[in-house]
């Protein structure tokens, strides 16, 4: 667990999984700028430390925890290290391009573990610690609509959308909102692991001819993380430059 950087007694506390890179890192910076104390949750200890140091250097309030999202006890310890839990953002995820007939059971389970079980664990434990008015934001994907070359990822993200709706129904009596952001193709370290020609081909399919920036997604996450939008629940917002609308002639 990283050292506490600034007092949080008067600040709402937001936990962001996958918070040390890509969309997660952009989200922790946005939420910290919005006045939250942010807890950066990521399995990469060096990246967590660097992210917390960066935020601290900007005069923002942050701590970090190097844990695996599938480790329930570590997640509980991370949540309990703070005086309050106001927001949980579930941004951790993995993606490995594979053709359908190349995905084995182990790979499929690992994708579901990180992308779906990892969301369930911190959302469930976070909700148990939230007062009325708490907010949970999951990160699904436009990929939940389907696609080729990543069936395990599609299944996991479709599961996140279903889980989001189910949690919203069960938690509305506690006045805890649960919503999902479904990003389109975004320029992140994860997508940059694609071969250059595949990355370029994916970008070419975007209506704007460009991938989203992580900050584009972070601003949408911050919308649902705000106390001002707590009356919205069970919704999935596609942030994909309009590609999910279709009508592109491709």
Image: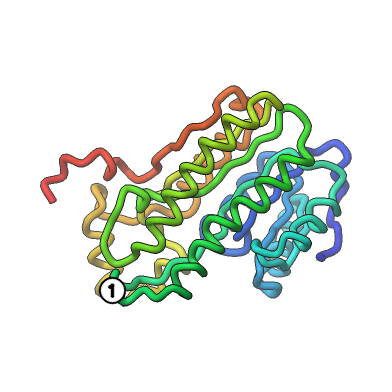
| Residue at figure coordinates x 85%, y 36% from the top left | 10
Q: How is the image coloured?
A: rainbow
Q: Mark 1 sits on what residue?
A: 101
| Residue at figure coordinates x 57%, y 35% from the top left | 224
Residue 116 shown left or right of residue 41 in the figure? left
Q: Which residue appears farthest toward the front when viewing the image?
A: 105
Residue 221 shown left or right of residue 199 in the figure? right
Q: Which one is in front, 60 or 207? A: 207
Q: Quadrant of residue 12?
A: top right
| Residue at figure coordinates x 54%, y 36% from the top left | 166
Secondary structure of the residue carrying tag 1 is: helix
The residue carrying pointer 1 sits among few (fewer than 14), some (14 to 19) or many (20 or more) residues within 10 Å by Cα, namely: few
Q: Which one is in front, 58 or 101? A: 101
Residue 83 locus on image (x, y percent): 87, 44
Residue 208 locus on image (x, y percent): 26, 48
Against 172, residue 95 (above or below) is below
Residue 96 locus on image (x, y percent): 41, 71
* Badge count: 1
Residue 69 locus on image (x, y percent): 65, 61
Q: Which one is in front, 141 or 198? A: 141
Against 130, residue 97 (above or below) is below
Quarter of the image with the N terminus is bottom right
Against 84, residue 192 (above or below) is below
| Residue at figure coordinates x 22%, y 59% from the top left | 204
């Amino acid at each position: 667990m990283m050292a506490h950087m600034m007092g949080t007694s008067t600040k709402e506390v937001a936990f962001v999984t996958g918070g040390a890179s890509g969309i997660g890192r952009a989200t922790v910076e946005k939420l910290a700028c919005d006045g939250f104390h942010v807890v950066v949750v990521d399995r990469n200890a060096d990246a967590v430390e660097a992210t917390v140091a960066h935020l601290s250097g900007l005069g923002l309030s942050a701590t970090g925890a190097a844990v695996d999202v599938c480790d329930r006890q570590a997640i509980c310890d991370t949540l309990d290290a703070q005086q309050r839990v106001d927001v949980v953002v579930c941004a951790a995820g993995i993606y490995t391009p594979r053709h359908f007939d190349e995905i084995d059971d182990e790979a499929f389970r690992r994708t579901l573990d990180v992308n779906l079980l990892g969301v369930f664990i911190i959302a469930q434990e976070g909700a148990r610690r939230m007062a009325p008015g708490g907010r949970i934001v999951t990160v699904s994907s436009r990929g939940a609509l389907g696609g080729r070359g990543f069936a395990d990822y599609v299944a996991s993200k479709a599961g996140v959308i279903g889980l989001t709706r189910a949690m919203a129904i069960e938690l509305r009596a506690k006045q805890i909102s649960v919503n999902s952001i479904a990003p389109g193709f975004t320029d992140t370290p994860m997508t940059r692991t694609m071969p250059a020609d595949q990355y370029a081909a994916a970008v070419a399919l975007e209506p704007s001819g460009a991938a989203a920036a992580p900050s584009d997604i972070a601003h949408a996450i911050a919308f649902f993380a705000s106390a001002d939008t707590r009356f919205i629940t069970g919704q999935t917002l596609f942030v994909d430059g309009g590609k999910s609308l279709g009508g592109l002639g491709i």
